[in-house]
Amino acid sequence: MTAKGRALVVEDEDLVAMLTEDFLEVLGHEVAFSAATLQAGLKIATDEQFDFCILDINLRGERSFPIADMLTSRSIPYLFVSGYGREGVESRFPNASVLTKPFSLQSLDRSVSKLLAND
């Protein structure tokens, strides 16, 4: 089976990262890259090839918005995930997709499907 899409997962909580990666694989996507810090995520977002990104907003006390800026400049769709929902997203990202933690396999599937359909 060919993967639906290659993902970058940027998440600083190990268990949430593993769950997200497992969910994506169940849904038929390939997790191409994973990062737990702003710096690592930004480097991958700048240098590597992938189809979409699952992006935690708070990474060890730093906001992931520079990664979102890089993804936007490269026309790579991304999905913010946050325990704060839309409230945690800066107003300069009015059209960004947001998935509130905790999320289910079904809600991740809906969000990623919508994200890739808009691409």
Image: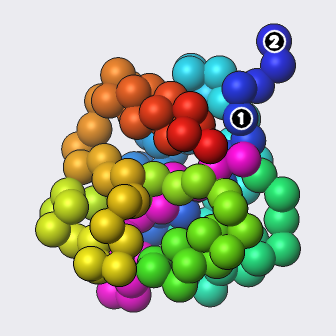
Tally the numbered discs. Answer: 2
Mark 1 vs 2: CB contact within 8 A: no
Q: State the mark number for residue 1.
A: 2
Q: Report the residue at 56% width, 79% height from top.
A: 69
Image vertical order of residue 78 relative to residue 25, above or below = below
Answer left or right for 97 relative to 66: left
Answer left or right for 103 relative to 113: left
Instruction: Give the spatial CA distance, label 1 vs label 2.
Output: 12 Å
Q: State the mark number for residue 31.
A: none
Name the one closer to the observer, 81 or 98: 98
| Residue 117 placement: quadrant | top right
Residue 49 position in % (x across, y down):
83, 57
Image vertical order of residue 82 relative to residue 2, above or below = below
Q: Which residue is mark 1?
A: 5
Task: Give the label, 1 or 2, closer to the camera.
Answer: 1
Q: Residue type at mark 1?
A: Gly
Quarter that holds the N terminus: top right
Magenta region, main secondary structure: strand
Using a 10 Å C-alpha cutoff, classify the residue at mark 2 as few (fewer than 14 neighbours), some (14 to 19) or many (20 or more): few
Q: Report the residue at 71% width, 35% height from top.
A: 5
Q: Which residues are magenta?
A: 51-63
Colour option used = rainbow
Residue 56 part of the magenta segment:
yes
| Residue 56 placement: quadrant | bottom left
Residue 48 position in % (x across, y down):
83, 65
Label 1: which secondary element: loop
Residue 116 visible in this rendered orientation of the protein: yes
Image vertical order of residue 87 relative to residue 110, above or below = below
Residue 37 visible in this rendered orientation of the protein: no
Q: Report the residue at 46% width, 33% height from top.
A: 114
